[in-house]
Image (tube, grey):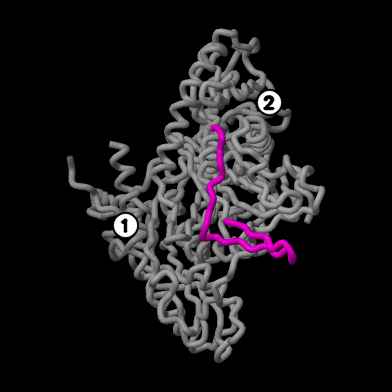
């Protein structure tokens, strides 16, 4: 670990108190009811707001119970480095977990998981943005996860697409994402962090099916822009859970629509 | 107060594209239909020949960037014998949140008597100029020109800085 | 998730402050060495909150702010570092304090101090038991003891405009046009620190005016923090 001279660093040997706390084991295959009381097919309630960062061109905040993500969009602005030049517009994405967002303390520097998620968000959004309208410039998306309780990737994609739309960036469609965790024959929609953890730690992998799927969907064009799947899954199960995710995306779409319509009406009210 | 205008969001199908319905700003066409590409209100304009243009008006100052033939306001930052550099502050009526870099080459300063142009007699750093975008230029900056009667320095300080 | 968090919002400006507790294990005899390192504040001015910040390591402003927060914690005496000791010579709490700016619209210092103090007051430490013989550590996250916070320092920032006009609680735009700045940190009716980083020189009556206003505001802000904390159920 290289020494970070620009931050105040604490003693290296400190540990989280939760490391010493008793662990409740969660067996996903023997689940009658999920720890938060939802049924396995139920999504968490979604709260969305635009215009949360006054300095940004567009911004949004999403809350799915304990998962909280904030996103700001800046640009189109000039590309500073000569080697990044292209006549087509560019989209960049910076995904960051705050140090306190997860059960284990995270580092200040972007780690490989965060870099990976940045690329995934970017790939999900790029097909939806009319980049040819912004030659020689770049649009920057900054995503910060304030609290991570599962499905952070899908929350981030949804949040970023709303932020882009509220920034007045031309888009072919909004992007809605939804995720599912699969353990054996059980498909958990919109998993929490506890469930995601239990899946990773599951020692018995029945029928060799354990993994998670996130689908990003363009609802009014009915196209899938990105699929990310982890773990070992059989084709039939993957296909089935993907369809469930798409159906859930369509369920969430009216919330996005409502938020953006409200955003526009507030803007008009402020103007007149 | 007028009834609230219908608000649409990106991806909303607006109408069929035809000879009498054309796509305007803030829209795109796909499979013969006009779709909205912005969050905003729908506006229909009809011209003399009864052709309707459907456009979507988003928020003001709509993520605009310099485009070819646009009239821009810029501040001169750097002058040398071959060209001067400037930062573009606004495009048309819209103020830019982030400045873009622009460049005026010596031969584009004025239309007449091009051989005898001396850059430091035309511009000084800090001058506010009005210029037209000639081309998107290279990786670094947009190419601007002031070779028109209406274009050139509009605001400057005297040599003593007053 | 389980961390005490507060959000300070001054008009358009908000800062989120979260404390993450960690257990520090040191060997016997090293305890004293760590006394001053048991709270680690870091201010993050991410590119999310303003177009002026770029991704990458913290800039000068963030570094200065982190150091200011650290100085404030140690000099104001708002937490007694002895309280963080679990088992003398062996175990101690360490407070990782992250201050994340979500929307930068000027006067970051005041927002940081408010968020910091409110989060400290909201901090609860889970019960820890140490097995004397084996040295095993066990924590019980269901029982908490609140951290005792002795005092409530409040910072009030002013900018000097046009060499003689004083403005309190400046916005981002005002800060850019300012010719000087003063920050007064007060606790109740006591003064903790005054920070005036260069700029326009001020007359002593102007400084006194700043101090009076800061003292007045510190009482108000302290009351506001207490009211807010009362309204949270834990």
Residue shown at 31%/53% (left/top)?
Answer: A261
> Considering depth in this image, is C219 or B110 the residue closer to the camera?
C219
In this rendering, the answer to whether A8 lies above or below B56 is: above
Give how far across and how far down residue B138 sits, in percent.
65, 46
Q: For numbered disc 2, what is the local secondary structure?
A: helix
Q: Are marks 2 and 1 on the same chain?
A: no
> Considering depth in this image, is C164 or A190 the residue closer to the camera?
A190
Asked whether residue B139 is in view, the answer is: no
Q: CA distance from mark 2 to mark 1?
A: 55 Å
Q: Residues within 10 Å of mark 1 (few under 14, many from 20)?
A: few
Asked whether residue A247 is in view, the answer is: yes
To which quarter of the image does residue A269 belong?
top left
Q: Which residues are magenta?
A: C127-151
Residue shown at 63%/12% (left/top)?
Answer: C201
The residue at which mark 2 appears reads as B119
* C131 drawn magenta: yes
Give how far across and how far down residue B117 sits, in percent.
67, 25
* A15 drawn magenta: no
The residue at which mark 1 appears reads as A258
To which quarter of the image does residue A228 belong?
bottom right
Q: For numbered disc 1, what is the local secondary structure?
A: helix
């Amino acid at each position: 670990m290289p020494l970070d001279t620009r931050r105040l660093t604490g003693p290296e040997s400190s540990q989280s108190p939760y490391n010493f706390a008793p662990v409740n084991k969660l067996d996903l295959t023997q689940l009658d009811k999920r720890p938060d009381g939802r049924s396995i097919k139920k999504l968490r309630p979604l709260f969305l707001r635009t215009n949360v960062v006054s300095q940004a061109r567009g911004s949004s905040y999403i809350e799915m119970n304990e998962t909280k993500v904030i996103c700001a969009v800046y640009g189109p602005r000039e590309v500073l480095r000569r080697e990044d030049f292209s006549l087509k517009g560019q989209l960049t994405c910076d995904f960051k977990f705050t140090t306190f967002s997860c059960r284990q303390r995270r580092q200040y520097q972007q780690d490989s998981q965060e870099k990976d998620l940045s690329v995934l968000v970017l790939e999900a959004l790029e097909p939806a943005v009319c980049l040819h309208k912004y030659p020689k410039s770049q649009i920057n998306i900054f995503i910060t996860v304030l609290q991570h309780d599962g499905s952070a990737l899908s929350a981030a994609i949804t949040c970023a697409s709303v932020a882009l739309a509220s920034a007045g960036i031309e888009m072919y469609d909004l992007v809605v994402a939804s995720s599912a965790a699969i353990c054996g024959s059980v498909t958990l929609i919109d998993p929490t962090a506890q469930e995601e953890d239990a899946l990773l730690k599951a020692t018995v992998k029945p029928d060799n099916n354990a993994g998670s799927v996130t689908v990003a969907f363009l609802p009014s064009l009915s196209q899938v822009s990105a699929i990310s799947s982890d773990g070992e899954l059989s084709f039939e199960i993957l296909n089935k859970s993907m369809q469930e995710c798409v159906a859930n995306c369509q369920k969430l779409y009216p919330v996005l629509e409502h938020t953006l319509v409200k955003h526009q009406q507030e803007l008009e009210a402020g103007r007149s | 107060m007028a009834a609230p205008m219908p608000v649409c969001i990106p991806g909303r199908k607006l109408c069929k594209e035809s000879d009498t319905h054309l796509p305007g700003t803030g829209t795109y066409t796909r499979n013969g239909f006009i779709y909205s590409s912005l969050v905003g209100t729908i506006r229909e304009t009809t011209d003399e020949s009864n052709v309707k243009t459907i456009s979507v008006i988003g928020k003001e100052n709509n993520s605009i960037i310099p485009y070819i033939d646009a009239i821009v306001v810029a501040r001169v930052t750097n002058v040398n014998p071959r060209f001067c550099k400037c930062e573009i502050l606004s495009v048309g009526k819209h103020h830019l949140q982030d400045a873009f870099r622009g460049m005026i080459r010596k031969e584009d300063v004025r239309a007449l008597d091009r051989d005898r142009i001396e850059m430091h007699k035309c511009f000084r750093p800090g001058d506010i100029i009005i210029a037209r975008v000639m081309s998107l230029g290279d990786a670094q900056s947009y190419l601007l020109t002031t070779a028109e009667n209406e274009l050139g320095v509009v605001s400057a300080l005297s040599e003593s800085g007053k | 998730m389980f961390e005490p968090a507060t959000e300070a919002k001054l008009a358009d400006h908000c800062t989120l402050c979260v404390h993450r507790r960690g257990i520090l294990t040191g060997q016997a005899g090293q305890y004293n060495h760590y006394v001053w390192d048991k709270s680690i504040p870091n201010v993050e001015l991410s590119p999310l909150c303003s177009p002026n910040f770029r991704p990458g390591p913290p800039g000068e402003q963030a570094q200065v702010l982190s150091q200011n927060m650290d100085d404030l914690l140690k000099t104001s005496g708002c937490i007694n570092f002895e309280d963080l000791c679990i088992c003398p010579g062996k175990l101690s709490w360490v407070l990782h304090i992250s201050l994340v700016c979500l929307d930068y619209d000027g006067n970051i210092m005041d927002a940081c101090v408010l968020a910091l103090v409110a989060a400290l007051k909201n901090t609860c430490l889970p019960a820890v038991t140490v097995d004397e013989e084996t040295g095993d550590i066990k924590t019980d996250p269901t029982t908490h003891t609140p951290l005792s916070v002795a005092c409530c320092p409040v910072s009030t920032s002013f900018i000097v405009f046009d060499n003689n006009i004083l403005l309190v609680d400046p916005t981002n735009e005002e800060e850019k046009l300012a010719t000087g700045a003063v920050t007064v940190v007060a606790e109740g009716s006591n003064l903790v620190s005054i920070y005036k980083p260069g700029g326009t020189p001020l007359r002593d009556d102007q400084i006194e005016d700043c101090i009076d206003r800061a003292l007045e505001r510190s009482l108000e802000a302290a009351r506001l923090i207490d009211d807010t904390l009362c309204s949270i159920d834990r």
